[in-house]
Structures are given as structure tokens and as C-alpha cells.
């Protein structure tokens, strides 16, 4: 443990020294770093795909779409716009500041810590790293020990692409996390569960380190009576079963208008069969649960529930057939915690007001999905329910565009990123007033005769 602590302390000290040299302020160097990272990711694409298959049984199609391709697009998007974002921006000058000029200068925080989860172990480590490097920071990346294959590949890629004073990977378990949280980082970016997020925030608060927390929660999916049910079912199943349901923004439960619930249940069953066959747990392209502990937790959630389809499982492969629960009780275990697996409770409702009341009475979710063409229903749900982000007539897709900020609210997280928001998250906006020396505004001084009268006219 002492050896681990000494090694981590030495890395942080070296990164802080490198940052203090001013090397990371060079925009050309930042762009070069992003280009090096892009080439490294393409060079090791096969290794990344193989590691994702080992850890989570992700198919090449899913792994590229949700882990590799989205990261390459983020590099391209940011690289194209970085010079513009990094320029000082003029700000308006108040009348009381006549003669001066104001500007906002984005500057990097310094040395940042990125703690990644196991469910998207590659994307959720590299995507924030792109923002950190683009903003001019040095970075320490801590991958999840629950995805050891991806952790090893990440370490190899970063070690080859960057000197350790610029970016490095620290592998390990809880001891490594604890030691990292004792270090004087300038920013911490964490993706993971709500309980661990609270630990991260508590540790950061002791040193007044700013944080971004990308957490989770129970994200509702609402299907109103006018929805296109076949299309809705396909998009819900896609959102729920990507990564075998181990997605922080997956639809956690369905609220379905009672008039169309039976028809939607049938459409959901058909969509599952169309995507994964009659026995999804035997389909090689269907993902597995990350480990035995999470597998057993999910199986327990199915106990005493009205499972209308699926739920069969293979413990040796850690696969669970997509399970649909009809009319789960709000007090049952499956409705008390984020499911994070291929289990979908379906609950009927009568009015959209009932839905709004139900969702409002619970912690603010990371995502919300609504299937309807009714403008009034759209307006009510979007304006009255607070959530991180979401889609109308789709699932997941709001997180796949660099033009939208991604993040939670309340218990589902603090802060956001993606695209320009990644750059802003890892940048401090420094305010500067350039005052003129050609004349002096004397009314601000205590000796000014008419100072108070002038100030009252200007500041009212």
C-alpha cells in the first residue's frame, strides 16, 4: 500500500510540475495530443474490441457504436473547433466601467482525475480525457477494476501515446481509489453510482476540489396512448438491452397508458425476438452481466414478480434473457433501486397528470423518454418534470450527439460534458478587466464630492 501511495504521489507531483511549466497552454500541442490519441485508438481498435468482448461480451457492432466510434467522433468534433473555443472572448463593459475593456479567458484547471465505471469502460474513460486534454490539463485516468481487460488495454494505449507527466492510467481496486482521492487534484470527474458519487464528493469537499458527477437513477419511459407502438417497442428494446441493460440512461421502467398496454407488451416481446431470437441468453451477440455479484442481484429482483416474458438465465455465462414484469409494485425491490440490467417493469397509467405526479415524487432521473405525438403531453412532461436529458419518440440518442450537454440533475449528477461542454467542464473561465490609463473615474474614491450621487445614478 505504501509503495502504491508513493507511486501515485510521484505521478501527481510530476504532472503538476509539468502543468506549471506552461507546456499545456499551447493550442497546437493540445491538437497534436488529440491527434496522437486518435491514431492510437485506431491502431489498437482490435485490442479494444477484444477487451470489451471479454469483459462484457459486447458484439463488434455494439462495441464500435457505443464505445469506439463515439469517442473518435468526439475527437474529430472537438479538434475542429478547439482554436475558436480557446480564444479569449470579449465581454460587454458596464457603464460604470467606462473606458475599460472586459474579456473572459478559458484556462485549464491543472491536474485532473478521471474515474471511469465498468459498464462503458472504454468510452467513459476516454471521452472525459479528450475534454481534459483539449482544455489544457494533465490527467490521471482510473479505469474500473471490474473491466480488467479494458483497463489493461487503456493503460497500454495511454502509456504509448503520452508521457506520464501529461496523461497516465492508474490501475487497481478500492485501495488505489482511496489513495487517489487523498491527492491534491485540481478537478475530479467521476462516472458511477450514486452511493460512490457521495463518497467522491465528500473526499473532494475536504480539499475544495470541484467535481463533475455523472451518476444514474431510475429513468422512466412514458408511452402515451397515441404512440406508434411497433416503432416505440423497437426503440425501447434497443435502449433497454444495449449492453444487456447495463446503461445509466437505459429506460429503467415503463409507464404505459392502460388503453394500449396489452398491445405494447406484445410489441416488446416481438422486438426482443426480432433482435435476439427466441432464446436471447444463447445469442452470442447478446451482452452478459459484468460479474456474478451483479448477476445474483438481478436474479433476486425477479423473485415474486409477474414476469410475462423472459427471465431465464445461464449462470455459467452470466446471461439473463430480457425479462418484462407486468404491473410491478412500487414498493417491490425492483422499483426501489436502479435496475442496471435486462429487466423492464411495465406499469399502467390513466392520465398524464398521474405520470407527472409519480415521477415528480421520486429523485430526479438522469434520463426520461416520452413516446407520443400529442403536443400538449410533450409540453407538460418536458416543462414539469426535471431530469438530466432525454428523447421524445426515441431512447439513448440524446447522449450520442456532441451538440448537446450530457449530465444529470439532483441525485442523478452534477455538471455535464460532450462536445463544447467537455471543453467548458475542464476549463475555468477567468474574468479580466483592462482599465484605461488615459483618464480616471474619480467618483469611486472616498474624496469625491458628487461620488455618491453619480454611483446612485449608475447602480440602480
Image (cartoon, rainbow, N blue to C red):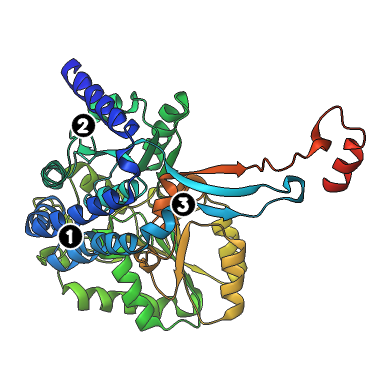
* Number of numbered labels in the structure image: 3
- The CA distance from mark 3 to mark 2 is 26 Å
Against 10, residue 285 (above or below) is: below
Q: Position of residue 151 (x, y in %)?
A: 16, 43
Whether residue 269 is visible to the viewer of this picture, yes or no, is: yes
The residue that disc 1 covers is 287
- The CA distance from mark 1 to mark 2 is 24 Å
Q: Earlier in the sequence, mark 1 or mark 2?
A: 2
- Which label is found at residue 326? none
Residue nearer the viewer, 104 or 118: 104
Against 88, residue 141 (above or below) is: above
Q: Residue furthest front?
A: 438
Q: Quadrant of residue 191?
A: top left
The residue that disc 2 covers is 173
Q: Earlier in the sequence, mark 3 or mark 1?
A: 1
Q: Position of residue 86 (x, y in %)?
A: 42, 53
Q: Position of residue 35 (x, y in %)?
A: 21, 56
Against 42, residue 299 (above or below) is: above
- The CA distance from mark 3 to mark 1 is 26 Å
Q: Secondary structure at mark 1?
A: loop
Q: Residue at x 17, y 38 (%)?
A: 163
Q: Residue at x 44, y 33 (%)?
A: 201
Q: Residue at x 12, y 55 (%)?
A: 48
Nearer the observer: mark 3 or 1; the answer is: 3
In the rendered image, the quadrant that contains the N terminus is top left
Dot 1 alpha-carbon crowd within 10 angstroms: few under 14, some 14 to 19, many 20 or more: many
Q: Secondary structure at mark 3?
A: loop
The residue that disc 3 covers is 408
Amino acid at each position: 500500500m505504501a509503495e502504491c501511495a508513493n507511486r501515485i504521489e510521484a505521478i501527481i507531483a510530476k504532472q503538476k510540475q509539468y502543468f506549471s511549466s506552461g507546456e499545456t497552454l499551447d493550442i497546437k500541442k493540445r491538437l497534436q495530443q488529440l491527434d496522437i490519441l486518435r491514431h492510437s485508438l485506431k491502431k489498437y481498435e482490435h485490442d479494444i474490441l477484444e477487451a470489451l468482448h471479454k469483459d462484457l461480451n459486447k458484439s463488434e457492432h455494439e462495441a464500435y457504436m457505443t464505445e469506439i466510434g463515439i469517442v473518435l467522433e468526439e475527437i474529430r468534433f472537438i479538434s475542429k473547433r478547439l482554436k475558436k473555443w480557446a480564444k479569449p472572448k470579449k465581454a460587454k463593459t458596464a457603464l460604470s466601467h467606462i473606458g475599460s475593456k472586459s474579456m473572459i479567458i478559458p484556462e485549464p484547471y491543472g491536474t485532473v482525475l478521471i474515474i471511469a465505471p465498468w459498464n462503458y469502460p472504454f468510452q467513459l474513460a476516454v471521452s472525459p480525457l479528450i475534454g481534459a486534454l483539449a482544455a489544457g490539463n494533465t490527467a490521471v485516468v482510473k479505469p474500473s477494476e471490474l473491466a480488467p481487460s479494458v483497463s489493461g488495454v487503456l493503460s497500454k494505449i495511454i502509456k504509448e501515446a503520452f508521457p506520464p507527466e501529461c496523461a497516465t492510467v492508474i490501475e487497481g481496486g478500492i485501495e488505489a481509489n482511496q489513495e487517489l482521492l487523498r491527492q491534491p487534484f485540481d478537478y475530479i470527474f467521476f462516472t458511477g453510482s450514486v452511493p460512490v458519487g457521495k463518497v467522491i464528493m465528500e473526499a473532494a469537499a475536504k480539499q475544495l476540489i470541484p467535481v463533475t458527477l455523472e451518476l444514474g437513477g431510475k429513468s422512466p419511459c412514458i408511452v402515451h396512448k397515441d404512440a406508434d407502438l411497433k416503432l416505440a417497442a423497437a426503440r425501447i428494446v434497443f435502449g433497454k438491452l444495449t449492453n444487456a441493460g447495463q446503461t445509466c440512461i437505459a429506460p429503467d421502467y415503463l409507464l404505459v397508458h392502460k388503453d394500449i398496454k396489452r398491445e405494447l407488451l406484445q410489441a416488446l416481446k416481438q422486438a426482443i425476438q426480432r433482435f435476439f431470437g427466441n432464446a436471447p441468453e444463447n445469442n452470442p451477440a447478446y451482452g452478459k452481466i459484468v460479474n456474478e455479484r451483479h448477476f445474483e442481484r438481478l436474479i433476486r429482483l425477479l423473485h415474486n414478480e409477474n414476469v410475462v416474458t423472459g427471465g431465464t438465465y445461464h449462470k455459467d455465462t452470466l446471461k439473463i434473457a430480457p425479462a418484462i414484469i407486468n404491473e410491478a409494485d412500487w414498493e417491490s425491490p425492483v422499483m426501489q433501486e436502479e435496475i442496471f440490467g435486462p429487466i423492464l417493469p411495465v406499469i399502467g397509467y390513466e392520465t398524464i397528470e398521474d405520470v407527472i405526479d409519480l415521477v415528480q415524487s421520486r429523485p430526479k432521473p438522469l434520463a426520461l423518454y416520452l413516446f407520443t405525438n400529442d403536443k400538449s403531453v410533450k409540453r407538460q412532461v418536458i416543462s414539469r418534470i426535471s431530469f438530466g436529458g432525454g428523447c421524445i419518440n426515441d431512447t439513448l440518442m440524446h447522449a450520442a450527439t456532441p451538440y448537446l450537454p450530457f449530465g444529470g440533475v439532483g441525485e442523478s449528477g452534477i455538471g455535464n460534458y460532450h462536445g463544447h461542454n467537455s471543453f467548458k467542464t475542464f476549463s475555468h473561465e477567468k474574468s479580466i478587466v483592462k482599465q484605461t490609463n488615459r483618464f480616471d473615474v474619480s467618483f469611486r474614491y472616498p474624496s469625491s464630492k458628487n461620488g455618491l450621487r453619480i454611483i446612485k445614478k449608475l447602480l440602480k
